[in-house]
Image: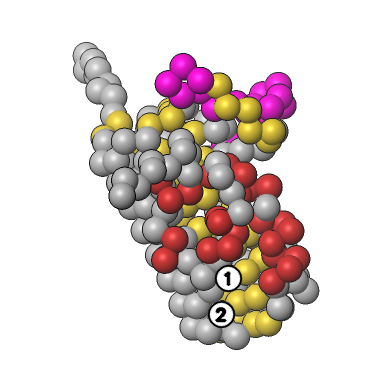
Amino acid sequence: MEIPSLPSFHPVQFFDLSQTRHQKLFHAAEKIWQVLSLIETYLEEILSPGLHGEIAQSCYIGPKVYVGKGTIIYPGAMIEGPAWIGENCQIRTGCFIRKNVIIEEGCILGNSCEFKNSFLFKNCQVPHFNYIGDSILGTKVHLGAGVILSNLKLDGSEIKIKYNGNIYPTGLRKFGAILGDGIQIGCNAVLNPGSILGKKTVLFPGVIWHGVLLEEGKVIKYKQKLEIT
């Protein structure tokens, strides 16, 4: 029996859903960006606040936050919530986790990083000076220092996805990036609103990216011409 192909932008094209205990959130979406508008309601349904990790006294943690065992919250971190943070994560000094964020186990959220309405699968590393707005990061995604996932167009209009000659309205004014499993992003790269990259993509440092690349394992780079006089 022939297995039907998945529709374009189905969550399974980007993520191994065995790497999250929140599979229900993804099963409710036909297009991957639809997950972004479901996070808030999902957290309202499942969130049972509790702090089970190692929490520094100088942190601020809001009342609607769950922190799993083995997770370390360093001095000076701020978690507004609602937020769900799994086991064995590191939330380092100066990290700001805003509303509606889900962090799976083994993730590193570093200094001067900001997160808002986003989902991180297991073992993501977002360690230095990063902005993650309205985005989903797959398993073992790594962002170099200074990487920005921009989530709002300058004119504030709806973000639409253009792919293979088709235009997909998302219904979203704020939509950062979808990064499939195993993606590596180099330092100071900027991904513009509505960016989508397939599994194991490598984006070189300093690249400014906008658009869709669904093929796996591609390398995106540009060659800079230097003149020394």
Seen at 68% across and 35% down, the residue is: 172
- Can you identify the residue that label 1 sits on? 85
Vertically, is 153 above or below 136?
above
Tag 2, which secondary structure? loop
* Image side of residue 157 versus residue 20, left or right: right
Magenta range: 148-166
Q: Nearest the camera: 19 or 85?
A: 19
Location of mark 2 (residue)? 68
Determine the residue positioned at 42% across, 21% down. 164
From what the image shows, is residue 179 above or below residue 115?
above
Give the residue displayed 50% in from the left and 58% down from the top. Answer: 120
Q: Is residue 227 visible?
A: yes
Q: Crowding near pointer 2: few (<14 within 10 Å), some, many (20+)?
A: some
Q: Position of residue 181 (x, y in %)?
A: 37, 52
Q: Specify the quadrant that holds the C terminus.
A: top left
Residue 66 horizontal/vertical position (percent) = 65, 75
Q: Earlier in the sequence, mark 1 or mark 2?
A: 2
Q: Is residue 164 magenta?
A: yes
Q: Is mark 1 on a helix, strand or loop?
A: strand
**Mark 1: few, some, or many residues within 10 Å (few <14, many ≥20)?**
many
> Is 169 included in the stretch rendered in magenta?
no
In the image: residue 3, left or right of residue 93:
left
Work out whether residue 171 or residue 191 is closer to the camera in this orientation and state it: 171
Residue contact at pointers 1 and 2, CB within 8 angstroms: yes
Mark 2: amino acid: Gly
